[in-house]
Amino acid sequence: MINSEIFYLFFIISIGYIIGNIKINGFSLDITAIFLVALIAGHFGMIISDNFKLFGLAIFIYAVGLQSGPGFFEIIKSEGIKLNIIAVILLLSIFICIYFLGNYFNLKKSVIDGILTGSLTNIPSLASALEVKNDPIISIIFGAVYPFSIFVTIFFIRMLPVIFRVDLNKEVENYEKEKKEKSPLILTKNFKITNENFKKRPIKKSQVEKITSTIIERVESQNLEDLEEKKDIYLHYNNIVRASGSKEQLESLRIILGNEIGDAYKFHDDMKIFKLLLTSKNIIGKKIGSIKELKSLRAVVTKVGRAGIDIKPHPSLTLMLGDKLYVVAPEEYGQRITKLIGNNLLKYPAADFLSISLGIIFGIALGSIPLYLPFIGEIKLSFVGGILITALILGRIGRIGNIVFQLSPNSNSLLKTSGQLIFMVAIGTNAGKYLLEELSKNGFLPIYIGLFSITFSLFFVAFICRIFLKMNFLNILGVLSGGMTSTPTLSVVNSVSKSDYPSIAYTAVYPMSLVITIFLAQLVLKI
C-alpha cells in the first residue's frame, strides 16, 4: 500500500503542510508548499491520477460556488460590470504580451498558442485551441509552461500584498466595514403618536410601514381594532409604538407619528424579543412571507443578521442557514418559535450528500451542453464552469422542495479544503512528471515569455486597481485569481487572508473570464 496513490496523496499533503508552516521573518509558503512538494514528487514518480484531480476540483468548486452564491448576485448588481472589465483587461494584457513577444522571436502560432494556454493554466482553452488546430506542439508547450505558470501565478499573487505593503487583516476589517455601510444597522426605537392628524382618523399599521419602510413590532393601546385576525391594526393618537429600521427610516417614522420616547419604556403586553440562529431545515431557503407558522404564532421577524451585517426582513427575503433572526412574539410561544427556527447548529446535519451529489451532477451536465458563439463556433462551459454556475444558483435559492442545498459552515469548509488539497496534489504531480523532458526539448524561451507576460499583467492590473481605483485588496486578489481562472490561486488567497471574501470577486468574474480565455486561445490561430 506504500506505493499506492492514496499513500502518495496524504504523504505529499503532510510534507507540504510541514514546510508551509515554516515562517521566515513572518513569511511562509502556506498552501503553496503543497504544490511545490507535489511537483518534486511527480518528478520522482509519485503520480496522482486525473480522477483524483477531477474529484478534488469538483467538490472544491462546488463548495466555493455554494458559499458565494448569496453574495455573488448582490455583487453582480453592484460592482459586477467593473470587476469583469478589470478581468478582461488582465486577460487582454497577457494575450497582447505573449502574441507580440512570440512574433518578435519568430515563433510559430502553435508555439504561441501553447504559451498562452499554458500561461493561463486553463485546460478548456487548450481544448479549444486543439479543436481549431490539432497540433501536438500546442500541448507540448502547454505542458512546459503550465507548471511554471501555476507556481508563478500563485507565488506572485501571494507576494502582491507584500509588494504593495498591504495589511490583509486591515483589509478584512475595511471590507466588513464597507459591507456594513452598504447595509445600515437596523435599530429599534419607541414612539408616542402625537401627530394631530391621528385624532381625525386612525391609520392602518401596514400603511405606515409601507410609507416608512419600517417594521412596527409592538403597539400599546386600549382601543386596538383587529382586522383580519390581527394581521393588521389601526394606530390611534397617544398609542405607544416600538419599531425597527435604519436610522433614516426611523426618522421618517418619527415625523409621521410624533415624539420619540426612551428605550426604557416597558410595554404591558406579553410580547418578547427572541434572538435565534436559523438551523431548521424546514424553513432554510424559504422566503419570510411564505412561512405561515410565523403568522399563526403572531411572530414578527424584525431583523436578520447575516455575515456581520443587518438585513431588513422584507417578505421576499430568502432565509439562509446560520442567519440570526430577531423575532418579536408572545412569550408563551417562545418554545414553539425556537423549535420553528432551530437555534442549534449542532443538530443541523453535517452534510446532506444527496444535495451535494445532485448539485455536482447538474453542474457536470450543464458544462457538457454545447453553446454556439459567432466567429468562434461551438464551445462548452466545461466541467468547472458548469459546476460553478450550478453551485452559485443553488447557493442563492437555498432549496428545491424538500432538498436543502445549503451546508453548515463546518461542512462547507471541510468540503472546500479537502477538494483544494486533492486538486493541487494531483495537478502538481502530473505537471512535475514531464517537466524536465519538455524543457530539454523546447528550451526556456516559451517559459520566459509566459512568465514575463503573467507577472507584468498581474502587477499592471493590481497597480491600476489599488492606486487609481482604490479597491480593497481582497477584491483585487479575487479578481486576479478569477481573471486567471486559477483555482489554486484562490485557495492560497483565501488561506493567506484568513477569509472567504476574495471568493466573491472570484466567482463574479470567473464565468466571463472562462469564455474569454477560450476565445483568445482560438484567436491566436486565426489572426
Image: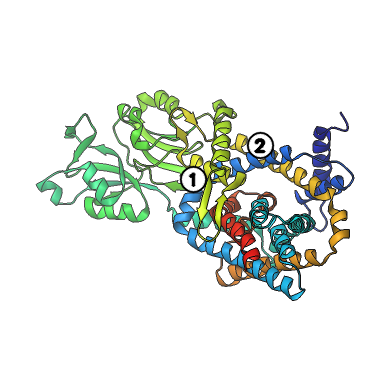
Q: Residue at x 85, y 64 (%)?
A: 443
Q: Which secondary structure lies at badge 1?
A: helix
| Figure quadrant of the N terminus | top right
290 or 131, which lies in front? 131
253 or 95, which lies in front? 95
Q: Is residue 285 left or right of residue 475?
A: left
Q: Which mark sits nearer the N-terminus, 1 or 2?
A: 1
Q: CA distance from mark 1 to mark 2?
A: 19 Å
Q: Is residue 393 above or below residue 280?
A: below
Where is residue 90 drawn, in percent x and y? 62, 65
Neighbour class for label 2 at 10 Å: few (<14), some, many (≥20)? Answer: few
Amino acid type, callout 1: Pro
Amino acid type, callout 2: Leu
Looking at the image, the residue that sits furthest to the bottom is 104
Q: Residue at x 84, y 53 (%)?
A: 435
Q: Which residue is mark 2?
A: 414
Where is residue 275 drawn, in percent x and y? 45, 35
Tag shown at residue 282: none
Q: Is residue 465 above or below residue 74?
A: below
Q: Which secondary structure lies at badge 2?
A: helix
The answer to whether any part of residue 504 appears in the image is no
Tag shown at residue 70: 1
The answer to whether any part of residue 375 appears in the image is yes
| Figure quadrant of the C terminus | bottom right
